[in-house]
Image (cartoon, rainbow, N blue to C red):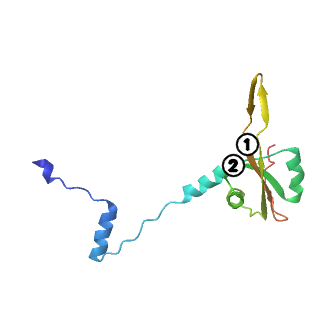
Amino acid sequence: MALFSRTKKESPEKEEKKEEKRGVVVEPKERKTAKKEIGKTSGVLVKPLITEKSSYLSPYGQYVFEVALRTNKVEIAKAIERAYGVKPVSVNIIRVRGKKVRYGKTLGVTKKWKKAIVTLKPGDKIEVYEGV
């Protein structure tokens, strides 16, 4: 009858409640949030856009990035601050619609995307053009 002699292991939450009833103070476990912070940055900024038009904006402290479709200005500003260590003054967003394309008889549309123009304080820089 070894089956009946086995005891069930209780979850850690139930054990903590029992210890609290006995008068033992239990400190809550710390939660890890570092992974969430890294994930938010990488999902927001897709890539910096390096074009002739965007290079004209850099002397004015403005930089252009392709961003995820569902992000807003606040999320983009936080992602820029985390990734480059520079706090933006303003963020402007532009939704670019997909272009109509044709491959032989087949008609289609390229995917829509979103770009952000980030303005920094005078004197701040983002090293985007290194190695280009």
Number of labelled discs? Answer: 2
| Image quadrant occupied by the C terminus | top right
Of mark 2 and mark 1, the one earlier in the sequence is 2
Element under disc 1: loop
Residue sitting nearer the eye, 117 or 83: 117
Q: Is residue 80 above or below residue 105?
A: below
Position of residue 92 measured from the top left corner of the image (x, y, whole percent): 79, 57
Crowdedness of circle 1 by 10 Å Cα count: few (<14), some, many (20+)? few
Q: Find residue 112 and name its label.
A: 1
The structure residue drawn at horizontal position 14% and vertical position 48%, both measured from the top left corner, is: 3
Element under disc 2: loop
User: Residue flagged by tag 2: what amino acid is it?
Assistant: Leu
The structure residue drawn at horizontal position 82% and vertical position 45%, both measured from the top left corner, is: 50
The answer to whether 103 appears left or right of 42 in the picture is: right
The structure residue drawn at horizontal position 77% and vertical position 43%, both measured from the top left corner, is: 97
Quadrant of the rendered structure where residue 82 is? bottom right
Position of residue 32 measured from the top left corner of the image (x, y, whole percent): 50, 60
Residue sitting nearer the eye, 9 or 108: 108
User: Residue flagged by tag 1: what amino acid is it?
Assistant: Lys
Quadrant of the rendered structure where residue 38 is? bottom right
How far apart in space, not on screen, are marks 2 and 1 (Cα)? 8 Å
Q: Do residues under tags 2 and 1 come within 8 Å of each other at their CB atoms?
A: yes
Residue furthest bottom as drawn: 23
Write down the residue under mark 2: 69
